[in-house]
Amino acid sequence: MFPIGDDNSARRGTPIVTFALIAINIGVFLLELQRGDAFITEWAFIPARFSNDPSADTLTLISAMFMHGGWMHLGGNMLYLWIFGDNVEDRFGSVRFLLFYLASGLAATFAQYAVNPASAIPNVGASGAIAGVLGAYLLMFPKARVNVLLGRQVVAMPAFIVLGFWVALQLVSGVGSIANTAQTEQGGVAYMAHVGGFIAGLFLGVAMGGLRKPTDMA
């Protein structure tokens, strides 16, 4: 079940922050390719390094959100942001959406950090922040039609089915990653960041007025 688009007929404006975030993520990834491992080590979030000196490593909490481990990692994240981010931004407004996005990313990072604060593996990616976007989207647009690729067919499904399946997959995988400590030290997908970001997206979506009608939004 692979989402490829959704219904944007009710969107009221141009999602400038969503577009900007996609552009920044791509730009930073190209910089990673140019600068190499030293750049990644300097700007990625490394739990053990943060545990040793949080004040000296605070900036990486933000910078790591715009870094990726490869083309597939980048492409998948940007596709999800492209599909779901514009609608959430349209409901929140650009400034509130940016604050929401960054807050979701921070919550996701700390969720993963809590699992293994002594890990020396660099954490990178927008996945946690985008998981927050998915949480807000599910909250605001549960019945929106999302086009998904099933085999060779494109099928329109309600968002609550598409995102519900995604959440279930993250929960099962996240529990497994916690149980398997060896896997945690080998790196891979930071499932708990996904779960943490999604939960943060739900709570922040309510706190920031995401359930109000668009005409009521400031």
Image (cartoon, helix red, strand yellow):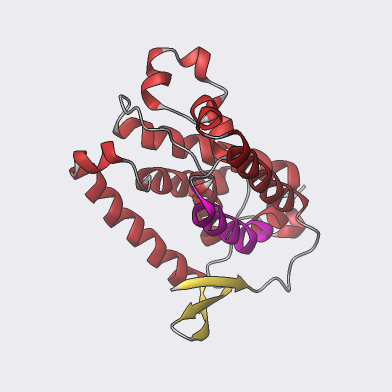
Determine if the magenta segment contains residue 98: no
Quadrant location of residue 151? Answer: bottom left
Label tally: 0
Residue at (56%, 40%) from the top-left corner?
A: 67
Residue at (47%, 29%) from the top-left corner?
A: 45
Quadrant location of residue 47? Answer: top left
Q: Is residue 147 above or below residue 210?
A: below
Image x and y of residue 107, in percent: 47, 36
**Magenta stretch: dominant SS?**
helix
Judged left or right of residue 26, residue 4 is: left
Residue at (30%, 34%) from the top-left corner?
A: 115
**Viewport quadrant of the N terminus:** bottom left
Image x and y of residue 83, in percent: 62, 64
Judged left or right of residue 193, residue 77 is: right
Image x and y of residue 80, in percent: 56, 60
Give 133 or 113, whichever is nearer the viewer.
Answer: 113
Image x and y of residue 159, in percent: 51, 70
Q: Is residue 193 above or below residue 63?
A: below
Residue at far right of view: 13
Give 147 or 33, whichever is nearer the viewer.
Answer: 33
Residue at (54%, 43%) from the top-left corner?
A: 204
Give 45 or 86, whichever is nearer the viewer.
Answer: 45
Residue at far bottom of view: 153
Highlighted magenta segment, given as a residue range: 70-87
Q: Is residue 13 above or below residue 161?
A: above
